[in-house]
Image (cartoon, rainbow, N blue to C red):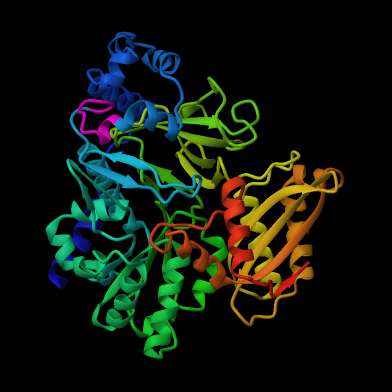
Amino acid sequence: MALLGNLIARSLRLRKKFNPPVAAPRIYQRHVLRHLLERGQYTAFGKHYGFNKILSEQVDFVTAFRNNVPVHTYNEMFKQWWYRCLNNEENVTWPGKVKYFALSSGTSESASKHIPVTQDMIKSIKKVGFKQLYSMTNFDIPSKAFEKGVLMLGGTTSLFERGEYYEGDMSGISAKNMPRWMSSLFYKPGQKISKRQNWEERIKLIVRKAPQWDVGTVCGVPAWVQIVFEQIIKYHGVNNIHDIWPNLSVYIHGGVSFEPYRESFKKLLGKPIQFIETYMASEGSFGFQAKPGRQGIKLVLNNGIFYEFVPFNAENFDEDGNPRPNPKAYMIDEVNENTDYAVMLSTCSGAWRYIIGDVVRFTDAAEGEIIIVGRTKQFLSLCGEHLSVDNMNKAIDTASKKLGITIREFTVAGFSYENLFAHRWYIGVDEGAQTDAVALKKIIDETLSEVNDDYAVERTSALKEVFVEVLPSHVFYDYMRSIGKEGAMNKFPRVLKNVQLQGWEDYLSKNNIKTASKA
């Protein structure tokens, strides 16, 4: 493996010396859309919406596409089209039959979704993976890190056979289609462990076998990776994770903002490592942090995914985060850096003008670099406060630093209060930690007023009160376990509404869970 790893490192450095010509983002995206329309024109979806006629508009086929194909949410795509793929029908929204369906983590819906994963999408995901590997030469990463194992803390790689197709976690689909040489030489914890369906069983085996591996890179959602690191350190009686994996150099993370976890992660390390953000979902792999010191994730624009960006405002979305009919959408070259956009995709898996649920902001529009600021379903705006997950993360990060505490998880709910409105924050800290809920509330409230003018205005009028309840952090993880969403790519929702809020409150009540402190 050392020889192969050395060859990989040398080839990456060599490739860096040759910079292939790069087209303008608009050219890439127009080419991608035309290719998608050409491939999809003979499908049931393509025939229904007249892709062949759209393609005849040589100059303005993008406008024709927008005018003829409506915006879709998951429920609309599934109820009208994707259910037919599950019934083994071919050529529904993409040529051929769909062999794999990714079961999403379902943070914005109560039930898991079935997302089609075609062979073209698997190729697209691999291509992004190699592009990210090439980009790692931009970071200060030791060459020997490329010789070491890659620990992927995703869902089970066991797929469930459902007649003519397989379903399971996206990480399982990716692992099944991983090159054999990579799986056998680099992939940890290995197929035998990763196929176990129970998250706790997988983690126990990973913890016990950790010293047997020489891990250079770790990938996964911050909350669960942090738990695994802590368990390894505790089980083996060491000071930090580098006592087990001295060559650990890279942590690739995604799914949620890393900022609330950054300080607590550093306490688990024996030396600095590179934190690199990636943007991947059940619908595809979209981009990654390409250079150190850059805040944004660089979108890959020539890889089977056509992006549109819908301003996330009251004109385009209702109060529940659902798109209104015919929302205004923009191409990659039409966006600006002062607007929050909902991401809309057309893909080589047969998603068409599909609202994925993420809300992004461009940090560098010319370079196509974004940050994820929230979810369409996880903004909180009862009375015009327009509170985003990005705002919440900043408030939690500020409170953690000022109070010197580790906040592992949090969620926020809005409700009617004394004929006006209020927010209730549930904040998870380590059991036994002394946390002043009054001070916590004050810092959160003040920080949100500083970073969000709408919030500041509403705090003087309709948003009458803010409540804070401090809970042991394990309560959040226990709840996720109780609803079958423990570990892997599952994330605790930052905003709780409707059924999710009722389920959380019922769980706290039925288990007689008391807050450590409240304000």
Please give the count of numbered marks on the rendered protein: 0
Instruction: Give coordinates of residue 404: x percent, y percent.
Output: 67, 76
- Residue 283 can be seen in this image: no
**Residue closer to the observer: 95 or 278:** 95
**Furthest residue toward front:** 510
| Magenta part of the chain | 84-94
Magenta: main secondary structure equals: loop
Task: Identify the residue at horizontal 48%, vertical 66% (top origin).
Answer: 223
Residue shown at 39% from the left, 86% from the top: 235
Q: Residue furthest bottom?
A: 237
Residue 386 in the figure: left or right of residue 350:
right
Along the viewing direction, whichever of 239 and 479 lies nearer the viewer: 479
Image quadrant assignment for residue 24: top left
Name the quadrant containing residue 141: bottom left
Residue at image position (59%, 77%) is: 430
Residue 180 visible? The answer is: yes
Residue 210 vs residue 483, the one in the foreground: 483
The reply, left or right, for residue 289 in relation to residue 149 is right
Q: Position of residue 277 (x, y in %)?
A: 43, 56
Relative to residue 204, is residue 302 depicted above or below? Answer: above
User: Eyeballing the image, is 81 above or below 240?
Assistant: above
Quarter in which the N terminus is drawn: bottom left
Q: Is residue 353 magenta?
A: no
* Quadrant where the image shows the C terminus: bottom right
